[in-house]
Image (cartoon, rainbow, N blue to C red):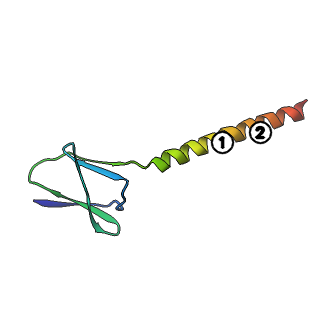
Amino acid sequence: RAFLVMRVTPHKYWHVTIDGRPVQPLVTNIGYQGLILTKGRHQIAMNYRNDMVLTGAASTLLSTLLLIVIAVRGSRRHDA
């Protein structure tokens, strides 16, 4: 067996798989996570999924579009 240390801050939104099977990473210290591996080659995947990131991105996009619409309408009034 081996212990793989990953230099990624532990957080509940990290989803890790080993060979396609979900595993729970172990908190190694405040700035690292780790996995216990069996002998042999493995495929490890880490994905960060937080719905708040998508919500924040959508909110930012909508706000930006609204500001563009306001700016365009305001410049048309000055042209007339």
Q: At 35% across and 66% down in the image, what residue appears?
A: 31
Counting other residues with Cα less than 10 Å from the Cα at mark 1, is it few (<14), some (14-19), or many (20 or more)? few
Outermost residue, top direction?
A: 80
Q: Position of residue 27 (x, y in %)?
A: 28, 65
Q: Is residue 73 left or right of residue 68?
A: right
From the image, tell me which residue sits under label 1.
Answer: 64
Query: Dividing the image into 4 quarters, which one contains the N terminus?
Result: bottom left
Amino acid on which the number 1 mark rests in the picture: Thr
Q: Position of residue 18 (x, y in %)?
A: 20, 48
69 and 12: which is toward the camera? 12
Query: Dividing the image into 4 quarters, which one contains the C terminus?
Result: top right
Q: Is residue 60 left or right of residue 4?
A: right
Q: Secondary structure at mark 2?
A: helix
Amino acid on which the number 2 mark rests in the picture: Ala
Quadrant location of residue 65?
top right
Q: Check if mark 1's residue and mark 2's residue have beta carbons within 8 Å.
A: no
Q: Position of residue 46 (x, y in %)?
A: 30, 49
Q: Is residue 23 left or right of residue 51?
A: left
Vertical placement of 70 versus 17: above or below? above
From the image, tell me which residue sits under label 2.
Answer: 71
Counting other residues with Cα less than 10 Å from the Cα at mark 2, is it few (<14), some (14-19), or many (20 or more)? few
How many discs appear?
2
- Disc 1 to disc 2, how far (Cα)? 10 Å
Q: Secondary structure at mark 1?
A: helix
Q: At 49% across and 49% down in the image, what residue appears?
A: 53
Q: Which badge, 1 or 2, is on the more N-terminal residue?
A: 1
Outermost residue, bottom direction?
A: 29
